[in-house]
Amino acid sequence: MRRSLLWICGLALAVETVSAQPYTLEQCRSMALEHNVKVRNSALDREIAVQVKREAMTHYFPSVSAGAMIFAANRGMAQMDMEVPVELPAPLPSMSVPFSLSLLKHGKTAGVGAVQPVFAGGQIFYGNRLARIGQRVAELQSALTEDEVLLQTETYFRQLESLEEKMKTLEASEALLDRLHREVSLAVDAGLTTRIDLLRVDLRRQEVASKRLELENGLAVSRMVLCQYVGASTVGFDIRSEHDVTPVPPTGYYVDPEEAVQRRIEYQLLDQNVEASRMKKRMTSGKRLPTVGVGAGYVYHDFLQRDHDFGMVYASVSVPITEWWGGSHATRQAELKLQQAENERQNSVELMVVEIRQTWNELQQAYKQILLADQSIEQATENLRLNEQYYAAGTVMLSDLLDAQMMLEQCRNQRTDACNEYYRSLTRYLQITGR
């Protein structure tokens, strides 16, 4: 029993250790593609488009219908009163006898028929083309959704990563303030300084403690948001950063905007939209054309207390005369919608070029912000070192030392934010350039 209890405890500890294993960005991205609701609904949209395409294919096959009917009336549906002449032997005169005829008081009938469309003005053909376009659009939309989910996953990941980096910076500030508090306390006890300096340190420590509380709450919320988005449990969830301390320059990622537009999913969607408008225009024109079909059927009926059945083949031609009256206007509408789709594509391409250039500028700006932050950290670190020396020598005020410490903390947080923005902009740039 004791061994079993120890084994269960060991297993629980092992499970907790595994669950506490930090997740990398790539692992979170993979989990999001597997569990995110948007991705799963996108997969369902693809399946719906496949079913629509298969349904459109059935229009090439014969249309088969069957029916049956049985009836009973209170009187015959065909009634007739007549007089039947009766020839009598001579020398008797001829005479007529009244006679009532009642038919179709009850009966039954059944039949089955199949009609094969031969020509439908191209509506079946273009309808299938339109269904294939719908399937392709669903696939492109699914890829676009995956890109959006990946970008949002990285945004949440970087946000959590940024807060953890700020927590490390805050912990360094806490360590410095704790050391400074001990030194000032000793100086106050020795009569070398007043309690005002100690109060200043305490106020700064309380300020840092308030920031810690905000960061802890932010970390908890960010962790929950990321877990919900990727479908992970919040128990033991943590992340592991793998990016470089100093990001590489973005020059190696540059792509010509005019070329990049051709590879974008949005551009392919615009092409499919134009093609779909073209198919709809042709289907509209096809509604004005005759439809031709051939068919065969089998009919059985029993109306006169006698079974009777027969088969037949036939051909049908339907001319949509009323479509000729308004068909030209409908065709013109379809032409205008096609022109709208082409105009929309041209306008969207121009906007995408602008978006690519703007994102590139944001990426360069984010990288320059990192370089500026590195310089600021270097200067703030040196400033803090000098203020510590001068404070120890008694040549500067305690407030100057605290200001130097606060400045270094701000510079480190600015660099953390700049790195977060850089990696977010880089991911976005790679996506919109089709890489």
Image (cartoon, rainbow, N blue to C red):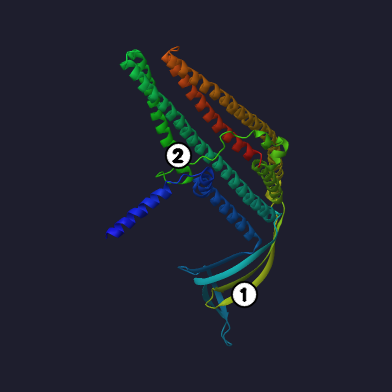
Residue 92 drawn above or below residue 238: below
Answer yes or no: is residue 207 visible: no
Question: Is 232 positioned to the left or the right of 134 in the image?
Answer: left
Tell which of 88 and 154 is nearer to you.
154
Write the residue at 30% across / 59% down: 3
Residue 114: x, y in percent? 63, 66
Q: Are marks 2 and 1 in contact (CB under 8 Å)?
A: no
Residue 340 occupies quadrant: top right
| Residue marked by disc 1 | 310
Question: Is 87 positioned to the left or the right of 181 in the image?
Answer: right
Q: Residues within 10 Å of mark 1 (few under 14, many from 20)?
A: few
Residue 120: x, y in percent? 69, 56
> Can you say which quadrant of the picture contains the N terminus?
bottom left
Tell which of 126 and 250 is nearer to you.
250
Tell which of 155 and 251 is nearer to you.
251
Q: Residues within 10 Å of mark 2 (few under 14, many from 20)?
A: some
Residue 67 occupies quadrant: bottom right
Q: Secondary structure at mark 1?
A: strand
Residue 346: x, y in percent? 71, 36
Numbered label tally: 2
| Residue marked by disc 2 | 225
Q: Secondary structure at mark 2?
A: helix
Residue 166 drawn above or below residue 290: above
Answer yes or no: is residue 156 visible: yes
Q: Amino acid at mark 2?
A: Val
Residue 315: x, y in percent? 70, 65
Q: Amino acid at mark 1?
A: Phe
Write the residue at 49% across / 18% down: 386
Distance in Å between CA atoms under marks 2 and 1: 71 Å
Q: Earlier in the sequence, mark 2 or mark 1?
A: 2
Question: Is 357 positioned to the left or the right of 409 in the image?
Answer: right
Q: Residue furthest left?
A: 1
